[in-house]
Amino acid sequence: MKNLFFIVLITFISSFSMAQNEPVVNDSIIYVKGGYQLTGLDKYPDAVVYSKSDAQLVYIEHQGIKMWCDQAIFYKEKNFLKALGNVRMNQGDTVTMNSKYAEYNGNTQLAFAAGKVNMRSPNTTLVTDTLYFDRNKQEAYYRSGGTVRDTASVLKSRVGRFFMQEKKYQFIDDVVITNPDYTIDSEQVNFYTETGHAYLYGPSTITGTTSTVYCERGFYDTRNDYGHFVKKSRIDYNNRTVTGDSLYFDRNTNFASATNNIIVTDTINKSIIKGHYAEVYRDKDSVFITKRAVAISLQEADSVYIHADTLMITGPEDNRVIRGFRDVRLFKSDLSGRCDSIHTRQSTGLTKMIKNPVLWSGKSQITGDSIHLQSNVKTEQLDSLRVFYNAFIVDKDTINDGYNQIKGKELIGLFKENALHKVKINKNVENLLYVKNDDNELIGINKGTSSKLNITFSNGDVSIITPIGNPKDETIPTDELPANARTLRGFQWRGDEQINSVDQLFMGKKPPVLTKIKGLPLPKIEEPFFDENNSGELNENSKLKQENLINRKNDQAPQSTKN
């Protein structure tokens, strides 16, 4: 009896030793070796069952892929294998995968893994319930939900596909990228594992603690925190919204820029800024905008438009300041003006027109070294104006083709229902006025001087003129006053510059040359994952059914179908 046991033991050890050292003769056939090898089992009549021993796990190899597991069921005639328990799969130095269960078809080179699947590449880790791996295509695919961990972010989606040669993930449906500083929600994301670059397609939102970005096509560097957005793009921050054909955003510096067809909306201060190039500095609470820049202050009765070559809006929402530089133009329905630069503080309602300013109110033209306009902050209506040094008010006499002129050192004007109602001119006042009779016939030209002069307007016309303080004047017959003597010193009529509508804000200016937007390419239309090569030969012993290897419409990239 002892001899019989000894012979059986020697035979088993010899068989085990041969299994351990069996050479790989044909690499097209899956090579398997393990601690224990059983054949002819009722449960697996056509298979060889390999089980681990205390010394070694089951080892599988096929054309560059290596696997380890607790137990392998190998159908050699079909070149098909099922691996169970602590499955680990390696493909060179690029991919390592663990799962509870896996199966592999050596003919189609399609692998399937299930149960706590964990696939690692140099920069990312994928966790999912089920995963398909096509070795011919070098692509992995899931559609039951998956989570990818990158060095900077966590990416989740219902459908995902990993292109190993491109080192690219394609995430589809309910895509969420979570970072400590922001969250991205998108319809489709193409993510490159080496760089952390994410390309967003379809309605996408990047939500941070202080700002939100929306786009329908965009790029975001998840490791360096900056992005570029080109379709229906929008940035919301501090009660402001920035839209444009192309937006750039850097989270590190809280800087954004916009190009072409830009609109910046301030909901708190009820204002809109337009232009074709803008820079936004969130930490400084400032916006710089140029190329047909226009600031619009929205008011219930009337809106105020300010255009300049360059506009700068600074300050918090309760103390917003608008500055305009070079060729400033101002328009509202009953008032317009021009100057070289302008400064408006919305909290006080004070607007300063600086260097060569001119205002038109009704039929009157007002000029001076500088002009201040004061609005009532509560009613949003014009309250008063002041002209400092060389104040000049001119009213064109349309009948006689002449100009009524009054000048002095400074001017104070009062508004009533946004129309100029009273004007006081102080110090060194001079006037030149066309005098008419009751039949509106010219009878002469009055020239006079005084210390002060008051004017009352009615319906935009000069109604009453009252000189004060040592007034001196004379009315000179028209034929006795030559044309070159009918203007006061410093007179300048700028009626051809007057702005009579919003469209005339850009009068005399060439349309700006818009920057050509490079844009972002549409996503590549990928071939479906399942095809006749990887799903045409389904082994009858597989856990999978043929319907598991069919491409479903709702699993396809939506942007590809739209293309």
Image (tube, helix red, strand yellow):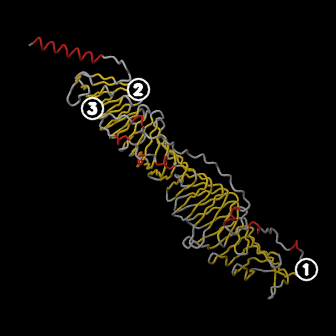
Identify the residue at horizontal 67%, vertical 76% (top origin).
420
Q: In the image, what residue type sits under mark 1?
A: Asp
- Residue 562: percent from left, percent from top: 50, 50
Dot 3 or dot 1, earlier in sequence: 3
Q: Is residue 506 left or right of residue 433?
A: left
* Residue with the mark numbered 3: 84
Element type at marker 3? strand
Judge whether residue 151 can be spotted in this image: no
Identify the residue at horizontal 78%, vertical 80% (top origin).
471
In the rendered view of the protein, which quadrant contains the N terminus?
top left
Is the Cβ of the residue at disc 3 closer than 8 Å to that at disc 1? no
Residue 479 is marked as 1
> Is the residue marked by circle 2 packed among few (<14), some (14-19), or many (20+) residues within 10 Å?
few
Element type at marker 1? helix
* CA separation in Å, label 3 and label 1: 117 Å
Q: In the image, what residue type sits under mark 3?
A: Leu
Q: In the image, what residue type sits under mark 2?
A: Gly
Q: Residue furthest bottom?
A: 438
